[in-house]
């Protein structure tokens, strides 16, 4: 009898707790937490306790109150290469830690923020369900006052679940697509866990909720527009813009409801650009209750029929597609690697990269602002399908819209971000997997209409929420050129000379040339080659430029860049990839690695890196 009662109780408790899981609100991540005169941040990074739960029994067994057995794990960091037996694990796992919440925080609003949990997370504080979040590479935060014991020890438990499913973004276990283990439908390893920082932070009761900064200029006069949203009963605030010499401009904020807008004019403005990434400090003060300290660069981004225009002038993006990937850390944030990557981008003469294939850690964007590196910022929509039934398509579309909204909230104030990418290589049925031959395939009408409508809607969301930037998607070789109607610019990935016409660069360049001319003739809009590259074993040499040799990689990249130098409408060339990166196990992935990096996974230059440096440093050519 007693056991029955206990079982019933446990069942009810877990049912209630599952029901109580509310979705995280993207608005909570609009302002990156900061320690300042009114706000506090307590990082929870360090060694947590960890336990896999393949049978999903933890919640009903009460693991949210404490794990019966566990092992150490570093947060942030992917679980895969830290914990024995977890390398290819797909399923549920638990994390827990204890934290004292300072008594001095009694009157504050307190939030618990995870900068990334891949893929699905559920959070408990002191055994009570707080909320959940879907999607691996963007932050989420919950207000946790009602769950916390202030001035005492608190228990935080989190589950992360990383199954691969056709209805997730990015998707996996898709019949007929990439054959790899784990069965992703994307070409990078499905690293999982708490991969970025975790923190508690406070907001005053009357606080700034959101700040949106946009900039422009006319002649020598610059404009910084600041839109502020607050919570609580303040009626006035101040915005102070300070230049590097300490000169200040101030404007008062007067709220109508919770909103206020100001426009600050800067005489003799110092523009932000790649060569001169000049930043202004922007301090937003809410009376004597709250403040937020940030920065901006005054710049515009637009396009004409041939080029992206930074501050009205044509710009050529020279850069890479990258990945967050490093031995042992996996996709876990590793600040020394981030810093090194920017040093190497500068060393090689690059001015840009795409956050292929997911938004990166927030620190990356701050460094890019300071270093003058331009970013195409991409949601994790890799390999979207438009042929596996209306229901699957619509579930993924909703998840894309959510990720987009989160990315726009998080990254909208960075001058380095110039273009939003809403998808990488979306596909209709005839184009991917075994059907791939690089040639354009028209696909079914229904699939095309769906792709154009859904991708179009994602681009439209970018325009609605952020009219100050451009938006587009990145197309794979063989997808219909009609899909390009949805983007502000054309972004294409091409592998002639590698996956098709292997080793034959003359033939490859003939095809590439014909295709570029055709695309430009159709759209008269700038084109960025967001991917082109060749796998290369560091140390393999070949007199006759055989594939996989360092000589072949140099020839491959040089052929594409030489061709691009003859086309004024090619406004960007991004080599795939900056560094070698981990993939699933697959026949075409020796050692489960993609070796298309111009640096190795540990950031040693291949021959191609030296050649790119020769081409790029001090020039404006590709
Ligand atoms: C492209 C994908 C990229 C892959 C690359 C490759 O966008 O993620 O890593 O191909 O095969 O199709 O190297």
Image (spheres, grey):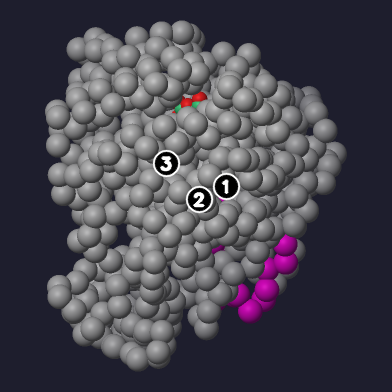
Earlier along the polypeptide chain: callout 1 or callout 3?
Answer: 3
Q: Using the image, tell me which numbered label, if any, was put on residue 67.
A: none
Asked if labels 2 and 3 touch by Cβ distance under 8 angstroms, the answer is no
Report x, y in % for residue 307.
22, 48
Left or right, 172 with respect to 560, comes to right
- Kindly give the residue lying farthest to the front in the view shown: 543
Do tag 2 and tag 1 residues touch (Cβ < 8 Å)? Answer: yes
Front position in the image: 167 or 552: 552
- Disc 1: which residue: 610
Residue 408 falls within the magenta-colored stretch: no
Residue 377 can be seen, yes or no: no
Report the span colored magenta.
99-115
| Residue displayed at 32% across by 14% down | 439
Name which quarter of the figure residue 394 lies in. top left
Give me the C-alpha separation between circle 3 and circle 2: 16 Å
Q: Position of residue 204 (x, y in %)?
A: 47, 75
Residue 46 vertical position relative to residue 354 in the rendered view, above or below? below
Return the residue at label 3.
Answer: 574
Label 2 to label 1, Cα distance in Å? 6 Å
Q: Is residue 310 above or below residue 498?
A: below
In the drawing, does residue 291 fall left or right of residue 526? Answer: right
Q: What is the quadrant of residue 423 in the picture?
A: top left
Disc 3 Cβ-to-ligand 1 distance below 8 Å: no
- CA separation in Å, label 1 and label 3: 16 Å
Which residue is label 2 attached to?
Answer: 614
> Image point 85% across, 39% down: which residue?
69
Looking at the rendered structure, the secondary structure element under dot 3 is strand
């Amino acid at each position: 009898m007693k056991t029955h009662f206990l079982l019933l109780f446990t069942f009810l408790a877990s049912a209630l707790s599952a029901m109580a899981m509310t979705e995280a609100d993207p608005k909570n991540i609009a302002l990156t937490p900061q320690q300042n005169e009114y706000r506090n941040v307590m990082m929870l990074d360090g060694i947590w306790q960890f336990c896999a739960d393949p049978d999903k029994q933890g919640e009903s067994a009460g693991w949210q109150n404490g794990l019966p057995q566990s092992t150490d794990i570093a947060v942030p960091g992917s679980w895969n290469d830290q914990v024995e037996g977890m390398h290819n694990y797909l399923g549920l796992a638990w994390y827990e830690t204890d934290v004292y919440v300072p008594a001095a925080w009694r009157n504050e609003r307190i939030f618990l923020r995870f900068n990334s949990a891949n893929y699905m997370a559920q959070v408990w504080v002191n055994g009570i369900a707080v909320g959940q979040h879907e999607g691996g590479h963007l932050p989420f935060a919950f207000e946790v006052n009602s769950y916390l014991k202030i001035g005492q020890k608190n228990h935080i438990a989190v589950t992360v679940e990383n199954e691969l499913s056709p209805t997730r973004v990015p998707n996996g276990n898709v019949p007929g697509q990439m054959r790899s283990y784990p069965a992703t439908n994307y070409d990078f390893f499905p690293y999982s866990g708490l991969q970025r920082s975790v923190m508690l932070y406070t907001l005053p009761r009357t606080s700034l909720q959101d700040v949106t900064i946009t900039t422009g200029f006319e002649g020598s006069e610059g404009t910084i527009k600041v839109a502020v949203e607050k919570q609580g009963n303040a009626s006035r605030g101040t915005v102070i813009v300070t230049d590097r010499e300490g000169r200040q401009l101030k404007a008062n904020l007067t709220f109508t409801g919770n909103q206020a807008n100001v426009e600050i004019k800067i005489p003799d403005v110092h523009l932000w650009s790649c060569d001169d990434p000049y930043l202004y400090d922007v301090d937003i003060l809410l009376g004597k209750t709250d403040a937020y300290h940030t920065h901006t660069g005054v710049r515009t981004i637009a396009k004409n029929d041939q080029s992206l225009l930074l501050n009205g002038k044509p710009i050529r993006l020279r850069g890479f597609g990258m990945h967050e990937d490093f031995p042992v850390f996996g996709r876990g944030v590793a600040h020394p690697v981030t810093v090194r990557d920017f040093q190497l981008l500068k060393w090689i003469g690059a001015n840009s990269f795409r956050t292929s294939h997911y938004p990166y850690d927030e620190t990356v964007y701050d460094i890019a602002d300071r270093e003058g590196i331009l970013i195409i910022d991409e949601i994790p929509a890799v390999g979207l399908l438009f042929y596996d039934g209306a229901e699957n398509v619509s579930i993924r579309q909703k998840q894309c819209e959510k990720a987009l909204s989160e990315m726009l909230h998080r990254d909208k104030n960075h001058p380095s971000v110039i273009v939003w990418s809403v998808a990488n290589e979306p596909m209709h049925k005839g184009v991917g997997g075994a059907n791939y031959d690089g040639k354009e395939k028209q696909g079914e009408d229904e699939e095309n209409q769906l792709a154009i409508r859904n991708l179009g809607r994602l681009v439209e969301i970018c325009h609605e929420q952020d009219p100050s930037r451009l938006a587009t998607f990145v197309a794979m070789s063989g997808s219909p050129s009609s899909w390009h109607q949805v983007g502000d610019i054309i972004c294409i990935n091409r592998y002639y000379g590698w996956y098709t016409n292997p080793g034959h660069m003359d033939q490859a360049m003939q095809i590439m040339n014909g295709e570029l001319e055709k695309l430009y003739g159709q759209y008269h809009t700038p084109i960025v080659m967001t991917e082109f590259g060749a796998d290369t074993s560091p140390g393999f040499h070949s007199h006759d430029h055989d594939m996989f040799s360092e000589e072949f990689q140099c020839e491959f990249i040089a052929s594409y860049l030489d061709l691009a130098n003859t086309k004024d409408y090619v406004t960007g060339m991004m080599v795939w990839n900056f560094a070698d990166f981990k993939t699933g196990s697959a026949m075409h992935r020796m050692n489960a690695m993609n070796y298309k990096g111009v640096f190795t996974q540990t950031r040693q230059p291949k021959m191609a890196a030296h050649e790119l440096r020769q081409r790029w440093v001090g020039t404006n050519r590709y």
